[in-house]
Each structure stands twice: as C-alpha cells, then as structure tokens.
Image (cartoon, coloured by chain):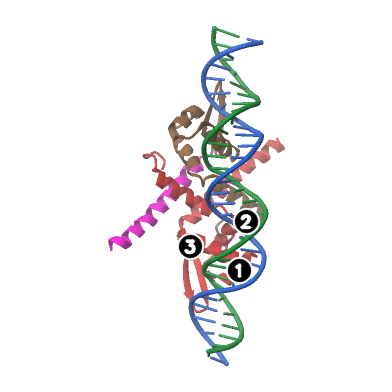
Chain colours: A red, B brown, C green, D blue
Amino acid sequence: MARKAPLSDEALELVARRFAVLSEPMRLRLIQALFEGERSVGDLVAATGGTQGNVSRHLQTLTQAHVLARRREGLQVFYSIADPSIFRLCELVCGSLEKSLTRQADVFAG
Amino acid sequence: MARKAPLSDEALELVARRFAVLSEPMRLRLIQALFEGERSVGDLVAATGGTQGNVSRHLQTLTQAHVLARRREGLQVFYSIADPSIFRLCELVCGSLEKSLTRQADVFAG
DNA sequence: ACTTTGTATGCGCATATACGCATATACTTG
DNA sequence: CAAGTATATGCGTATATGCGCATACAAAGT
C-alpha cells in the first residue's frame, strides 16, 4: 500500500473489512485468549465471560475472515489463530496507543 | 498484547476503536492519498471523489484518533499522517490479504 | 432411538455510523 | 463591512451489526 500504486476499490473494501473484523472488543478478547494456543468454544466462553451464542458468532466471523482456524474433535470445536500477522498487528496498535496515551499524559504532567 | 498480561477492558476498547477507524474504505482512501505527504481538503476531495462534507467528516474522525494531523494555512487546511505505524499496519494487512487470496486462488488452480 | 453435552443459528431489538443535503463557520480580499 | 472561497457541522435517513433469547444441529454414550 505504501509507495505502490493506489489500491483498487475492491482491495480497499477488503482491507477495510479486515480492520472491521478486529474492531470489536469481544473479538479481540477471543484473539487474546488464543495467543497461547488452541482452545475449545466452551473454554473461550469461560475465559471471556460472554454468552455461548455470542462467542460462537464472533468465532464464526473471525474464521470466515481467515483470522482463526476451526477443528472439530468429537463434541468440541477447537479454534486457533490461523493468521500470524495478527500478532504483529496487535503489537503495532498497542505500541502506537501507548505512545499516544503517554504523550497525552505528559501534557497534564507538564 | 502478545505474551503479556491480558489487556483490560478499557485497553481493548481503545484497540478496537483504533481498528474501527481504519475500517472504512473512504478513510483508507484518504490515508492512501496522504502517503506521499501533506494535502489540503479540497485536494483530497478531488483525489478521492467524495463529497466535501463527507471527506471533512472522515478527516475529523482520523484526526481525533491521532492518525492524522491538521494544520491551517489561510483558507486551506492541510492534513498529514501523524502516526507512522499506519504504514506498517497497512503493509501487514495487505500482505496478509495477498497471501490469503493467493491461497484461495491456488485452490481453483489446483 | 433417546438423552446428554457442546456448538451453531434464526429472530428481533437497540445502537452506531456513513452518506447526502443544506447551512454555518473561518479566513481572505476588495 | 460585503462578497467570495475553503472547510466544518447539524440533521434526517438508510444500513449494518452486536447482543440476548430461544432453538436447531452435531456427536457421543446408554
């Protein structure tokens, strides 16, 4: 995207969609819970405190976006992070936010 | 975020908000148009093909999120990218999407 | 086949937000 | 101070999406 030809409208929609998938706190919570590795839905429900239905829906969204991978084992379904770029993305945003907030704090601190 | 303590609810909201700001094609178009440097609102309106009001609103959103910086010079207002992490973010997402799409294409190509 | 356990999904509501339109504000010039 | 130019904003509407609730589906055991 940087220093290349401008992206087509379709490409922009895809990129926007990608960011949209990551723009919900509950989904970020799920991703965060999966940083350490594969987990079942029930496990994720317990870890995030969400309702079963809602968690399942968000997992579906993330899977359709190819952020997560799905694997069935008997009664349980295990989800895991399928796109490793997620790690860098979160690091980048967190780092950027830290700087931004530190700067704002400095304004008050003088 | 990775391999650290889980983020607080407030932190997750901030991260989500950050991604949300980047989840609109029009805003990505504006960001893309600013990759080469500072530009005026009128310039951006022409470059993106949006209406003046809409472009102005999106610029406001991006500025409040500290993604862009604003500078007035006479009648014109110039916007520029304030957060350099945007470059990496876009690169990461684009790269990830390329891989994802290539993989999907390979399924058809065999 | 029935029950139990784990997961997914249809539906309705409430909320958020992008857009177009018109208008207001900021600044410059005559 | 009036007119013109550049940008911002109030408002209404259409659409999207997150959530809770109930229920459907899938797989395993009895």
Q: First in sequence: mark 3 or mark 1?
A: 1
**Badge 1 is on which residue?**
A52
> Is residue D26 left or right of A10 when viewed as pictured?
right
Mark 2 near mark 3, Cβ–Cβ under 8 Å?
no
Tell if the residue under mark 3 belongs to the same chain as the one under mark 1: yes
Q: Chain of mark 1?
A: A
A60 drawn magenta: no
Amino acid type, mark 2: Leu
Alpha carbon separation for disc pair 3 and 1: 16 Å
Amino acid type, mark 3: Thr
Mark 3 near mark 1, Cβ–Cβ under 8 Å?
no
**Badge 2 is on which residue?**
B7
Query: What label sits on residue A63 in the rendered view?
Result: 3
Q: Which residues are magenta?
A: B83-110
B90 drawn magenta: yes
B26 or B88, which lies in front?
B26
Q: Is residue A60 visible?
A: yes
